[in-house]
Amino acid sequence: MQNQTNVTVRSALITEAIGRVGRKGQSLSLTGAFDVITRDITMQAPIFFNTMECYTPATTYNYITLPDDFRNRDTLIINETEMKYVEPNNFHRYYQTRDVSDVVAGNQSSAPMWYTIDKRLGRILLWPMPDAAYYVFFRYAALHPKAGCQLEFTSGGPEIPLVGETVVKGAASGTLSGIIVNDGTWEDGSAEGSLIFPTLTGVFAAGEIALGGHANNATIAAVSTAADNFKHFLGWEFDEVITNGLCWRACFYISDLQESKPFWKDEYDTSLINIMDLIVKYRITFKGNLWQSNWGS
């Protein structure tokens, strides 16, 4: 599990890269390049990071919307039990043989036990249909874990926050776009990790915060500013890889650095390969052709 505390903020990585290519102090926007590099890394390998989407599917639907950044599945958990994955063709074949009237009447509703991924529909399909609003956690590899504004927290729980809920601390607020838990559990109030936001409004002071309407549901350190708190989600081990990638991309914007492109591309590729060899949990799984659709299952 990655600890986001040690990840360097995006602006600092960009500043380091500009200095490495000999343009220290020069105004050069590499925010777009940052997104290009993180996307490239996650295209080369499915990287499992310790964040889960949390859902409460309605009892009248047998699906959950697939996350936009879905790359490769890892686990789907309901009621602390891992659900069994079924290949799409087998899932649809089984589902189509069920009596629709029984499903509508609720005779085949219970806690879901099986699921499949339908990328064409953009859904995680569940069977049986949920008979209650269960908490469902989906852990997956992200295609492009973009930088986000983050608040590190401790003492999280016992209520479980959901993506889309609002976090409030005095006049400061933000809408959750992701949650990373590095240690502990929500149930016993010991969760530690990062709350992720596209943007934050106001300045968060140190102390207890309200998550999803639940007062005092986590504790944060003081945040002096939200403007320079954007981090990638790959783990601190990838800081050097991203910096080398930013050096390579910087060569595209500076005419007299064109000849340096091959050098920095090689530095980027080599550092990525070295990290992938050293960190077993970030793994390339050669499941058929790397670029075929079976990567999404």
Image (spheres, helix red, strand yellow):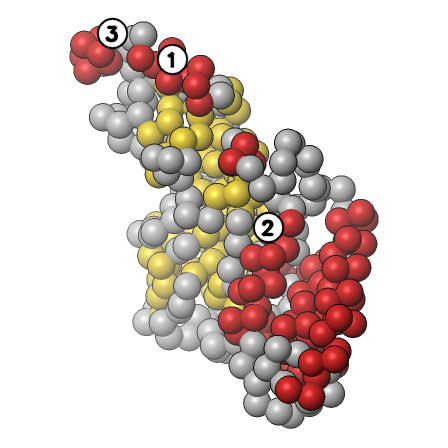
At which x and y percent is residue 26? Answer: 62, 91
For disc 3, the neighbor class at 10 Å (few under 14, some 14 to 19, many from 20) is few
Residue carrying label 1: 93
Q: Secondary structure at mark 1?
A: helix
Residue drawn at point x = 69 percent, y = 41 percent? 284
Q: Which residue is mark 2?
A: 43
Is disc 2 placed on a helix, strand or loop? helix
Residue pictured at 23% horizontal, 26% vertical: 60
> How far apart, in angstroms, are the residues tagged by discs 3 and 2?
41 Å
| Rendered position, 253 above or below 38 | below
Give the answer, above or below, for where 123 lies relative to 46: above
Q: Does residue 261 appear in the picture of this structure?
A: yes
The residue to which callout 3 is attached is 99
Characterize the local packing of mark 2: few (<14), some (14-19) or many (20 or more) Cα atoms within 10 angstroms: some
Residue at 60 percent across and 57 percent down: it is 40
- Along the horizontal axis of the image, is 98 left or right of 189? left
**Where does the image place residue 182, in percent across and percent down from the top left?**
61, 48
Q: Secondary structure at mark 3?
A: loop
In the rendered structure, which disc, 3 or 1, sits on the residue that comes first in sequence? 1
Q: Looking at numbered disc 3 in the image, what kind of residue is underneath it? A: Asp
N-terminal-most mark, 2 or 1: 2
* Residue at mark 2 to residue at mark 1: CA–CA distance: 31 Å
